[in-house]
Image (cartoon, helix red, strand yellow):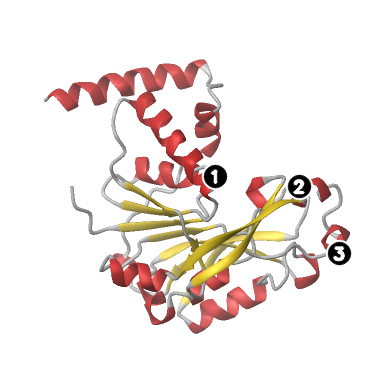
Amino acid sequence: MLFNKFIFDIGAFDGADGLMLALKNKDHMIFAFEANPEQCNIIKKNKLILEKRIGRKILNYKLFNLAISNKTGFSSFFISSNPTVSSVKKIRKNFSKYWKGYDDHFKIKKIIKVKTTTLKIICIKYKIKRIDYLHSDTQGNDLNVLKGMGEFVKFIQEGLVECAVKKDRSIYLNNHTLKEVKKFFKKNYFKVVKINSVQKDLYNEVNVYFRKITDKNNFEKINVNYNCRYLSRVFKKRTYLKDDIKDFFLRIYNNFFSLV
């Protein structure tokens, strides 16, 4: 099946966001990008677990072992003890002033070399001229992800990026701030739709939801109403009874239609 509608998941980690976007938006191809090869192996395993559970292949999901940034080549990738905060960016030495109790999370376990590319190059290679949704969580590098689009940034319709509230509250060296993100959006005709804190107990990082300033009728309806906690239970094989019942009937449904 060929797809001409696209969603990008940058910094895929364990695949949860991208796989849920694939399930919720079956007419879109999800391009998922993850720099850490170990996490790519985990994503592949998780995808198989999910496919077995729901009784069908997820054909609208493609994984790339790449770091997305504003330049091509190779970069150091700093793998932390908590892999969710691993990044191409170095950790600031005095970050703990505003991140008390998080020191163990950001201890660097090892440093590897990863291949970097830009979304502009991806769009040219796959002849993509529209990205209906962009989900980016690259731990301090999201603004570079957008800058790497160049003039192709106009292809993005809406999305989500993460940023530091202020420089002195950031975890990473040269982390972009909310002010810088807003400036970029204004320059490139995006509007901020919503901002919320990443951590409930700290206001150091925020998720910024944005949308292209254009005719509302031109937007593709993207279903972003999903709960990654469900997939976390599936991946860890700790599902609730309600999960098992729902997926049992879903598996029967998918198996029936695969025979039709």
- The residue lying furthest to the left in this view is 260
Who's the residue at 81% across and 49% down the image?
A: 102
Q: What residue sits right under mark 3 in the picture?
A: 94
Question: Is residue 155 toward the left or the right of residue 116 in the image?
Answer: left
- Disc 3 crowd, CA 10 A, few/some/many (<14, 14-19, 20+): few
Q: What residue sits right under mark 2 in the picture?
A: 105
Q: Residue 154: x percent and y percent? A: 38, 76
Q: What residue sits right under mark 1 in the picture?
A: 38
Question: Is residue 169 toward the left or the right of residue 159 in the image?
Answer: right
Task: Please state which of the two labelled residues, at mark 1 or mark 2, is closer to the viewer.
Answer: 1
Who's the residue at 48% across and 19% down the image?
A: 242
- Disc 2 crowd, CA 10 A, few/some/many (<14, 14-19, 20+): some
Task: Please state which of the two labelled residues, at mark 3 or mark 1, is closer to the viewer.
Answer: 1
Q: Earlier in the sequence, mark 1 or mark 2?
A: 1
On the image, which quarter does residue 153 sit in? bottom left
Q: Earlier in the sequence, mark 2 or mark 3?
A: 3
